[in-house]
Image: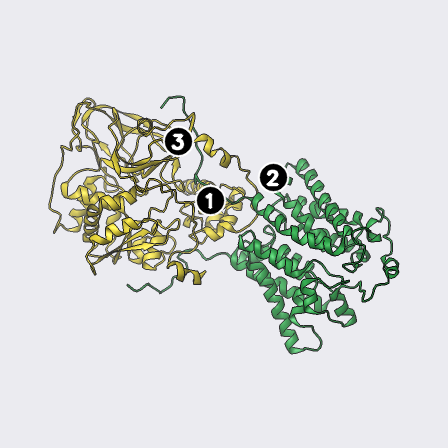
Amino acid sequence: MSSATKIEIRSGPHIKGPRSVEQIMANVVWSLLPICGFFVYQYGISAAASLLVVTGACLLTERYFVRQGGQAGDLSDWSATITGLLLALTLPPGFPLWMGAVSGIAAIALGKAIFGGIGFNVFNPALVGRAFVQAAFPAAIATYTPSFLPGRFTEFIPSTLAWPLMAPADSAAWLQAMKLDALTSATPLARWKFEGTLTSTWDLATSLAGHMAVGPSPVLILVCGAYLAARRFMDWRIPVAVLGSAAFCALLLYALYGTRYPDPFFMLFSGGLILGAVYMATDMATSPVTPRGMWLYGALIGMLTVVIRYYSGLPEGVMYAILIGNAATPLIERITQPEAFGTAVKKKERGR
Amino acid sequence: MKLLSYFRGETFARGIHPPHHKETAALPIRRLPFAPRLIVPLSQHVGRPAKPLVRVGQEVVRGEPIAAADGFISIPHHAPASGVVEAIELHPTANGPWTVSIVIRVHAGSTQEVLWRQPRELDGLDADRLVAAVQETGIVGLGGGIFPTHAKLKVPKEFPVDTLVVNGCECEPYLTSDHRIMVEQTDELIRGIGIARQLLGGARAIIGVEDNKLDAYEAIRSRLPEGGPVTVEAVPTKYPQGAGEMLIKTLVGREVPPDSRSYQVGAYVQNVATLANMGRLMPRGEGFIERVITVVGSAVAKPGNYLVPLGTPLRFLLDCVGAKDEALEVVFGGPMMGQAIASLDAPVTKGVSGILVFRGRDLAPRAARRTYPCIKCGECIESCPMGLNPSTLGMLAVKREYGRMADDYRLGACFECGCCTYVCPASIPLVQHFRVAKAVLKGRKAA
């Protein structure tokens, strides 16, 4: 033992588990890729361009604020990529690209950087971005284009390529020119709310039927979410609580007033509920950290979704339900602290 | 979770499953040679330092008392080798501060037999005499607790103890010294359990052995009479199964409330190494002068379970096991709760159950991991055996809200097992935050 040997001193524990922030975030990105692929399959190059532009805007904004603010993290933690992909998946296909870029910038700047970057954000950044453009461009965000249009891989939806600050071209005339049967540009939720027509559960769950105005397949999202939950990169409690609570509320209303409300399956598979429950409500930084809090938080979101969908002027309520759930998170955490060892004195003793 | 426990066997909630790394489990205990100089710090335990009984230049024989207990919460020390007292001076210790130590120059030609002992009949001794006899051995909690064993054995009369929980879990990765003791010193262990039961008024004893060392379980079970008051049980391998509260929960099903001692729920926990040493030393009337230590790690050429004379300087020990590198991290204890030592001149003391020696370059990737702000993934809450909220505690610590940590989030219940820090994907040094917070609060209380 030479006296030149250096001694390194670190505080314990001296071994470390395999988990890292980068690993968690990268796995969420991997699990999102099939969903994004399906989205592109549904809507063609318009969806692909939207995914690229929105994610790019998020990454550039993140880079700018991390450089400026000296915040922890950078693009290598993948969190801005998740925000971008999720945000693009919530925007209607054919949403003008420049508006998509605005939503990406708003998501990172107003949803994340303003609070101090990764881990400090109060609201889900992707939903902040979407709420921003919903308020700024209410017409464009309500304009849906049907899926599986012929020529979707060679031709952009006209509104996609609108010049910045210009109103998008009207897609209605362009659709008319295609002369397709059974074409609908209204989302299933809007059709139920404003026209009173229901879409079949199978079509909703798979998103495979032609010419519907729907997002990526809820079944595919559930499969990808199950992968994340199984590898424990996502807490399974939150989606189970959100979907369970939404289904319960819908079932209750369906049982009481069956003719006025759709069945619980319609509630579950329509709109963005599955995507929201699996990928948005589960955002770690904005959801409660306590296990009991997760149940409460999920139940609140599910209930609020049903209430907004049924009793407000809006056809869809997942976004606001999750944002309200985010806002309630500190309160929920406060009342659901874990039970410390030895505080629940149980009289049960193992017989020997 | 409740349902799963039926498959895995009843145990405490949460906890973690780090890789076991019990590579030295099959290596028999070997004796380490005597260093030319042995350094015996007067304070190797919780309580007042011992008072020296020898003078510089005095000849001592192996086993002879060289320092006497100063009061009840204190212990004597014995000469770990025959030799000459070279100095009584300040010397570096593992924790950092220098403390008064007796330096013995070992006689090179000596046979190093234990020449000092006071054998006695233990049967029929009353509790007070028995406690005094335990104190004379100078033994402390060898699992790392270093609380004087005799003082722990003096349970207040108003709390009847019905169960002696014998801790053979050795839940820390890498460490195998308790495992070897259970296999090789089974009779001494059972004798020690007998002495402890005598002191506790005939309480039943349950030996808990983690199910990754079933040979130790078998060795003990084969020596226990069927239907006797002493039983052995295999418990699920899970960290920190060897924490007293956790093992009581697993074996007896009782939870020790916060701010309470285990005897308040009628249980008493003692580590197997402590009991085996009591069983060996007390009938012979000898002092505690050597202990089994697992020496292992990426820098160790000859890992193993060594019987090390107390006071052996770390530098000498590392030479014996062939540890060398330009940079080392040396840990006294296990990798989860052990402490990195600051000086290679520090001696081995009574509380050291393992010595881990890692090459600096093996640790570099871990040290290079970026620390993120808490992303509130909740892994720490799912791992905390005490049911605390390390996530929120960590955020409060960063804001230096130490008072709230203690008052609202039960910081005092944390025993620094390190589970939260092990699992944290953001690499936040949570346990270190909690140690600092506790130290600050202690300072405030004293002020």
Which amino acid is tagged 3?
A: Ala
Q: How busy is the neighbourhood of tag 1: few (under 14 within 10 Å), some, or many (20 plus)?
A: many
Describe residue A223's horizontal placement relative to residue B186 as left or right. Answer: right
Q: Quadrant of the N terminus of chain A?
A: top left
Name the residue located 47 percent from the left edge and 47 percent from the top edge: B420
Q: Quadrant of the C terminus of chain A?
A: bottom left
Discs 1, 2: same chain = no
List x then y, in percent, for residue B17.
Answer: 43, 49
Q: Nearer the viewer, mark 3 or mark 1?
A: 3
Discs 2, 3: same chain = no
Q: How busy is the neighbourhood of tag 2: few (under 14 within 10 Å), some, or many (20 plus)?
A: some
Task: Provide the residue designation for mark 2.
Answer: A72
> What is the basis of the colouring in this image?
by chain
Q: At numbered mark 3, what does the secondary structure look like: helix, strand or loop?
A: loop
Q: Nearer the viewer, mark 2 or mark 3?
A: 3
Which amino acid is tagged 2?
A: Ala
List x then y, in percent, for residue B77.
Answer: 22, 35
The chain letter corresponding to yellow is B
Q: Nearer the viewer, mark 1 or mark 2?
A: 1
Task: Provide the residue designation for mark 3.
Answer: B299
Rendered image: mark on residue B422: 1
First along the sequence among labels 3 and 1: 3
Which amino acid is tagged 1?
A: Tyr
Q: How busy is the neighbourhood of tag 3: few (under 14 within 10 Å), some, or many (20 plus)?
A: many
The chain ID associated with circle 1 is B
Q: Nearer the viewer, residue B155 or B169?
A: B169
Q: Nearer the viewer, residue B38 or B178?
A: B178
Q: Colour of chain A?
A: green
Rendered image: mark on residue B408: none
Name the residue located 20 percent from the left edge and 52 percent from the top edge: B223
Mark-to-mark CA distance, 2 and 3: 34 Å
The chain ID associated with circle 2 is A
